[in-house]
Image (cartoon, grey):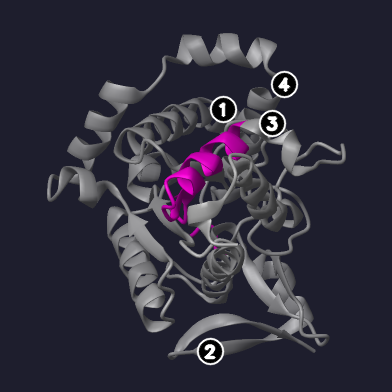
Amino acid sequence: MPLTSTPDTLPTTISAEILHLLLPHHRTTDLAAVTAESFPHQLAQISDFVRARAPIAFTLPGFPCKSPNPAKVLGHLPDMGERLSLTFLDALCQQIKQIYPPGAHISICSDGHVFGDLIGVPDAHIDAYSDELRLLISRLDLTKLSVFDLRDVLGDLDHDTKRAHVHDRYAPTVDGLRAEFRTDGHALALYRGITRFLVEDTADWTGTRSALQRECRRRAYGVIQRSRAWGDLIAEHHPDAVRLSIHPQPIGSPKFGIRLLDAPDAWTTPWHSTALHHTDGSWRLMPHSKATQLGRLILQDDRPSHFDQH
């Protein structure tokens, strides 16, 4: 049916069909069954694009940099995990185009520089990671994707100045976060998840385990402050976009959590793990230390890429 002659109810119908394409990939810790109607915020946003007969704009904060822990990842540059994830996201947009001709576009909002100093990753590694993401998107002809990072906002300022600008303008206070964690179970789960990642990603700690946990709890507040700040900055630059998230999100949240690849839990991402290619053709994300026990290392472009199962 041509969009020029649709009844008033059609935008909602098409929006529901588009959400049905996303639902199998929903990343959440909720166990309840969901339908498109479980996400009224996203339905309303997508319907606005449909009424305007415009491509649906999605933003996805993530793809920051590789974990600094060599037990998790193969190196500091994107590998098969990112390659598969980017291909999946572009294919999702292509599926949307099949039911909604104007299609969709995803802006990958690479946030490594926003909190690189808090997670122990050099800015040069973050630049190299982000540059390689752009090259991958171009080489793979993923026309529905683009990368947005602090260089698009603050140009060639030094990284510390950029971080300070974002933090000072947008970040919530630590006291405000503490109050939120006391009353919001999902926010508390995010704080604990980030703390766990920071503990796991600290590969060269020489102090006690309890001291490391205290230090990572402190840094977790900073990571969440900066992440919230980055989210507000993205909303300012992409005010109408549908917000995707690589973190688990509760049903009905303004952010739609999306799972990029199969993984053992709802928190694993390509930048915290290594890809293993199973003999049945499927892929799974896991720590480098585990993948090396299950498969043989495969190189691509003369760099470690992934593991093939024995």
Q: Which numbered circle lies on residue 185? A: 4
Residue receiving disc 2? 299
- Residue 301 in percent (x, y) is at 43, 90
Mark 3 to mark 4 CA distance (whole Å): 15 Å
Residue located 44% across and 52% down the image: 53
Type of residue at label 3?
Gly
Mark 3 to mark 2 CA distance (whole Å): 41 Å
Residue receiving disc 3? 252
Find out whether the residues at labels 1 and 3 contact each other: C-beta distance under 8 Å.
Answer: no
- Disc 4 is placed on an element classified as helix
Residue receiving disc 1? 217
Mark 2 to mark 1 CA distance (whole Å): 37 Å
Q: Is 262 rendered above or below residue 54?
A: below
Q: Earlier in the sequence, mark 3 or mark 4?
A: 4
Residue located 37% across and 65% down the image: 129
Judge depth for marks 3 and 4 and give the one in front.
Answer: 3
Q: Earlier in the sequence, mark 3 or mark 2?
A: 3
- Disc 2 is placed on an element classified as strand
Residue 287 occupies which quadrant of the picture? Answer: bottom right
Type of residue at label 1?
Arg
Residue 185 occupies which quadrant of the picture? Answer: top right
**Is residue 45 left or right of 163 when viewed as pictured?**
right
Judge depth for marks 1 and 4 and give the one in front.
Answer: 4
Residue located 66% across and 82% down the image: 307
Question: Which span of residues is magenta-colored?
Answer: 41-70
Residue 216 occupies which quadrant of the picture? Answer: top right
- Disc 1 is placed on an element classified as helix
Q: Is 305 rendered above or below residue 125?
A: below
Quarter holding the C terminus?
A: bottom right
- Residue 229 in percent (x, y) is at 38, 29
